[in-house]
C-alpha cells in the first residue's frame, strides 16, 4: 500500500489526511506534540532531528512539509527546519511537497500568477522566497523530487489563526460584529483549506507537478 507522511498537524494536515484516506492511502502525521488526526497514524518526533526523521519517512511515497515555527520566528528558524527535512528526504524516492503561501511575491498590484518573480522585501517574504529557491535548486540538481502548492489566507475546518478564522466567524455566530484586519472593501482571494489539502495530494500524485510551485484554485476574488 502507498504511504504518505505529513510533517505538522495543523489545519492543512487535517485536510491532507482527509484527501489521502478517501483514496485509501496510508498516512502518518508527524508532530512534536503527538497530535492525533482521525484516519492517520500518529508519530511523535521533531523534524529538526534529521536522522530520526529519515527513519520515519523511510519507504514512503510522499512527504508533505506542513510544519512551521511560530510566525514571529520564521526568519530565524524556518530555513533550518526546511534544511533538516530536505536532508532527511534526500536520497529517497519520495516526493517532497512544500506547503507554501504567497508571501514570497511581495507587494503586487495585479493578479498573482505562478510566473511572477519572488521579489518580496519583508523579512518573512524574503525567507519564503529563499526557501523555495533552495528547494528548486535541489530539484534541478537531481537530489530531490520537489513540488509546491501555494495558498492565500485559509478558511474552513480547524482554521483558527487566519484573517477569516476564529476571530471572524465566532463573532458572527454570536451575533456580533466580525473582527478582521485590513480594509474589508479590498478585493482578496481566500483558500478553502479542504481544497488546499486536495490540491496538495494531487500534486504529490502527479509527476507533471514536479520542479515548480503551483497556485491552489480559489473561489472568485471578492471583498471581505
Image (cartoon, rainbow, N blue to C red):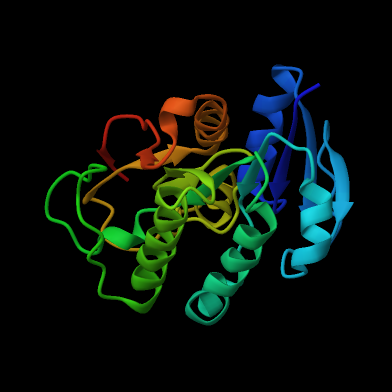
What residue lies at 43% left-to-right and 32% top-to-bottom?
Answer: 209
What is the x, y in percent for residue 197? 57, 34
What is the x, y in percent for residue 136? 40, 53
State the residue in front, 91 or 78.
91
Q: Is residue 158 visible?
A: no
Figure check: 18 above or below 32:
above
Q: Is residue 169 visible?
A: yes
Quarter of the rendering containing residue 189? top left
Q: Is residue 32 left or right of residue 94?
A: right
What residue lies at 25% left-to-right and 64% top-to-bottom?
Answer: 106
Figure check: 43 above or below 133:
above
Quarter of the rendering containing residue 156? top right
Where is the C terminus found, in terms of image quarters? top left
State the residue in front, 125 or 71.
125
State the residue in front, 223 or 219.
219
Q: Residue furthest left?
A: 109
What residue lies at 54% left-to-right and 48% top-to-bottom?
Answer: 144
What residue lies at 37% left-to-right and 60% top-to-bottom?
Answer: 133
What is the x, y in percent for residue 87? 64, 62
Q: Residue furthest top?
A: 23
Quarter of the rendering containing residue 103? bottom left
Amino acid at each position: 500500500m502507498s504511504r504518505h507522511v505529513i510533517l505538522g498537524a495543523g489545519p492543512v494536515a487535517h485536510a491532507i489526511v482527509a484527501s489521502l484516506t478517501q483514496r485509501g492511502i496510508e498516512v502518518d502525521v508527524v508532530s512534536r506534540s503527538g497530535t492525533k488526526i482521525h484516519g492517520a497514524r500518529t508519530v511523535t518526533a521533531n523534524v529538526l532531528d534529521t536522522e530520526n526523521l529519515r527513519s520515519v519517512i523511510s519507504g514512503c511515497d510522499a512527504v508533505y512539509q506542513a510544519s512551521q515555527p511560530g510566525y514571529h520566528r520564521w526568519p530565524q528558524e524556518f530555513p533550518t527546519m526546511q534544511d533538516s527535512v530536505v536532508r532527511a528526504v534526500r536520497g529517497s524516492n519520495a516526493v517532497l511537497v512544500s506547503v507554501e503561501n504567497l508571501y514570497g511575491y511581495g507587494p503586487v498590484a495585479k493578479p498573482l500568477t505562478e510566473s511572477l518573480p519572488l521579489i518580496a522585501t519583508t523579512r518573512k517574504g524574503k525567507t519564503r522566497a529563499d526557501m523555495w529557491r533552495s528547494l528548486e535548486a535541489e530539484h534541478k540538481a537531481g537530489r530531490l523530487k520537489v513540488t509546491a502548492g501555494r495558498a492565500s489566507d485559509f478558511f474552513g475546518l480547524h482554521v483558527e489563526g487566519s484573517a477569516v478564522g476564529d476571530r471572524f466567524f465566532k463573532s458572527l455566530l454570536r451575533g456580533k460584529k466580525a473582527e478582521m484586519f485590513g480594509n474589508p472593501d479590498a478585493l482578496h482571494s481566500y483558500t478553502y483549506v479542504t481544497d488546499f489539502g486536495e490540491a496538495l495530494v494531487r500534486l504529490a500524485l502527479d509527476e507533471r507537478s514536479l520542479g515548480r510551485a503551483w497556485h491552489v484554485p480559489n473561489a472568485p476574488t471578492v471583498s471581505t
